[in-house]
Amino acid sequence: MSWLSDLFGGKSKIRQALKEGGIIIDLRPAPEYDQGHIPRSLNIPVDRIRANIGRIRDMRRPIILCCAHGSHCWEAMSILKEAGIDRVYYGGGWESVWRVVRGA
């Protein structure tokens, strides 16, 4: 993970969010998601986050965001925090989050 993910999310925060039943949202477009993703993650492309705020809020669980390299996580995190969803964690690139999930 990058220093940014360590600063704003970090492996320990992601692990804790997962222990609390956290949901991983993969922000990549469906074709990219279909080429490889974290099992049981949800695919909500970044351009569909606003349309899914109610659905995400209704989950009532921590949200871990991932994408191709981490840049879309900032946009989605900002949108979700603006909507009052506070337990949102920057995961960065999906492969980095996958390593945390697997315990690597």
Image (cartoon, rainbow, N blue to C red):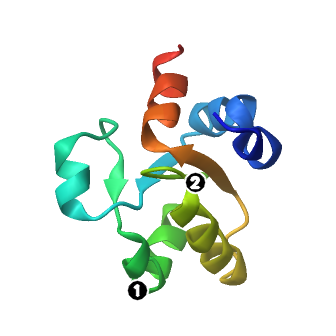
**Which residue: 40% across, 86% down?**
51
Note whether 75 is above or below 25 in the view shown: below
Q: Amino acid at mark 2?
A: Arg
Q: Which residue is mark 2?
A: 61
**Could you say where residue 42 lies in the image, as x and y percent from the top left?**
34, 54
Q: Amino acid at mark 1?
A: Ala
Q: Nearer the viewer, residue 51 or 27?
A: 27
Q: Quadrant of residue 15?
A: top right
**Which residue: 70% across, 82% down?**
82
Note whether 46 is above or below 3 in the view shown: below
| Secondary structure beneath label 1 | helix
**Could you say where residue 36 lies in the image, as x and y percent from the top left?**
24, 39
Mark 2 → mark 1, Cα distance in angstroms: 18 Å
| Secondary structure beneath label 2 | loop
**Which residue: 70% across, 74% down?**
81
Q: Quadrant of residue 21?
A: top right
Question: Which numbered circle lies on residue 88?
Answer: none
**Could you say where residue 95 lies in the image, as x and y percent from the top left?**
43, 34
Q: Give left or right: position of 76 versus 14.
A: left
Q: Give left or right: position of 24 versus 6.
A: left
Tell me which label, 2 or 1, sits earlier in the chain: 1
Q: Which residue is mark 1?
A: 51
**Which residue: 67% across, 75% down?**
78
Q: Nearer the viewer, residue 89 or 95?
A: 95
Q: Nearer the viewer, mark 2 or mark 1?
A: 1
**Could you say where residue 17 lies in the image, as x and y percent from the top left?**
64, 40
